[in-house]
Amino acid sequence: MRAVGFGLLLSLLLSLVLTPLAGRVALWLKALDPFSARKLLRPSQVPRLGGVAIALAFYLTVTLLWSSGSVVARATLQQGTPVLPILLGGVPMLLLGIVDDLRGLRALPKLLVEIVVALFLYSQGLRVLGTTGPTGPIELSQLLSALVTVAWIVGVVNAVNLIDGLDGLASGVAVIALGTTTVAALIRGDLLLAFVAGSLAGATLGFLRYNFNPASIFMGDSGSLFLGYLLATMSIWSVRKSATAVLVIFPVVALGLPLLDTGLTISRRFLAGRPVMQADRDHVHHRLLLMGLPVRRAVLWLYVACLVFGALSLLMVLGGPLLSRFGLVLAICFALLLGHRLGYLRGGPQGLWAALARRRRTQQLLRAMDALSLKLESCQTVSDVEDQLAQFGQLLELPLRLKLDSMMDEPMPSAAQPAVMHEPSDGFPVVVPGKQGRLLGYLRLESPSRSVNPDERTLIGLLCDSLGPTLDRVTRTPSPSA
């Protein structure tokens, strides 16, 4: 027990010291939050690479307690425990995130690295072997076990990455999930798992001190990939000796919010006929912002949702068979309630079935977007761009207007005063991203006769990303008449 407490406290203190240093290094390397029209928050000059501080605090804690002779810490290298492979696998995940934060990577290379790391862990014995069904034990074949193990690790990694959209959201969600894992491990007498999960919880909590709204540093992909990986692997570790089917589902409930968001994300993109890997701004946190909640309150509401999922997962661990099944049913009902309250499982333009009904039109608009991107490359003046926008606005059935003028030199807001953009009743402003974060202008909807649905909002964001390079070029280049 003392090792668990020491690990949590030491990693917390180390993270409090290392996070500001990571922020300074990120500023020196110009590793800043990317400027994207898909964001509801207008980005500020906030450094990334906060995940490096989390990882260093975590690894240093394990190393220092191991070198001090802690029995629990030294058990990390004992044969038969999965700790060493888990720690080794975290290094390429961290490096992958750092490269993405500094240079930017496409989805496919990241996915390939995640799969390779997951297969490495499978080869080291960290596997989803099976569960127990109503008729007895269900053992997975080697192939199915490998597929399920890889799918779980990759799925959780990307779930944490997807929910990292507001100040303190992903880090807070991780702290709650890790705290739940630590408590569950202590209840079941697994001190080694409690030590590792508690140490990572402390490191993440120290980072959250600087990451909560208004954030002075973001974790970046270095943090979201690293935390997602460790959450996924520790959850497999935590249920390796489970005897009941319900307890095997314990990690799914503990990670209920990010997994729910990922499930809804994949569902709405698939039903709408959009590429599953195509980013949008219709996650659960985006919907709370569009409902009018300020960032801090939206994050706190999502913390409450995570605490509910965590409490229900602990109920599954503490209770007997009947109580465990009752906790699982409550978790499913709570997830459905969240989906309904946020509009995904309702009728109307915000629902999933509406996305399916718009599927053909959405695909048509995506093809038109591809053609428009090619036309924008040949534009020579702002007037040419405006003509193309007017034509696309007619197809979109929403009047588009580009506004540049005085906003061309508008400074970026500071981290202490982030500017939140909501959709007003008389139009929907979208920031046009520019080179090195330069604010070029806004694309506005001029007095639309109807509300904008999530798929159209995504298309407008994609359009703004395409407009950035074109506007940067035509506003810097003198017109032919000049």
Image (tube, grey):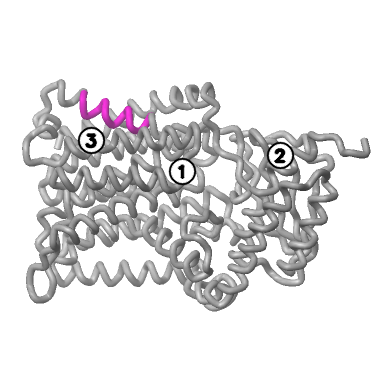
The three-letter code of the residue at mark 2 reads: Leu
Q: Secondary structure at mark 2?
A: loop
Residue under label 2: 439
Q: Nearer the viewer, residue 236 or 197?
A: 236
Q: Quadrant of the C terminus?
A: top right
Helix, strand or loop under label 3: helix
User: Which residue: 44% across, 22% down?
Assistant: 21
Q: Is residue 376 magenta?
A: no
Q: Position of residue 321 (x, y in %)?
A: 13, 69
Give the vertical position of 261 relative to 219 (above or below): below
On screen, residue 156 versus residue 4, left or right, reads right
Q: Is residue 416 left or right of residue 322?
A: right
Kindly check if marks 2 and 1 are in contact, taking CB atoms under 8 A apart as contact.
Answer: no
- 179 sits to left or right of 426: left
x, y percentage for residue 450? 72, 71
The mark closer to the camera, 3 or 1, is: 3
In front of the other: 255 or 363:
363
> Badge 1: how crowded within 10 Å, few (<14), some, or many (20+)?
many
User: Alpha carbon of mark 2 to alpha carbon of mark 1: how far?
Assistant: 25 Å
Q: In this picture, is 464 found above or below 148?
A: above
Disc ID at residue 88: none
- Name the residue at 11% across, 67% down: 138
Label at residue 87:
3
The magenta span reads 53-63
Read off the residue under disc 1.
Answer: 168
Magenta part mainly helix, strand or loop? helix
Point out the tag, 2 or 1, that comes first from the N-terminus: 1
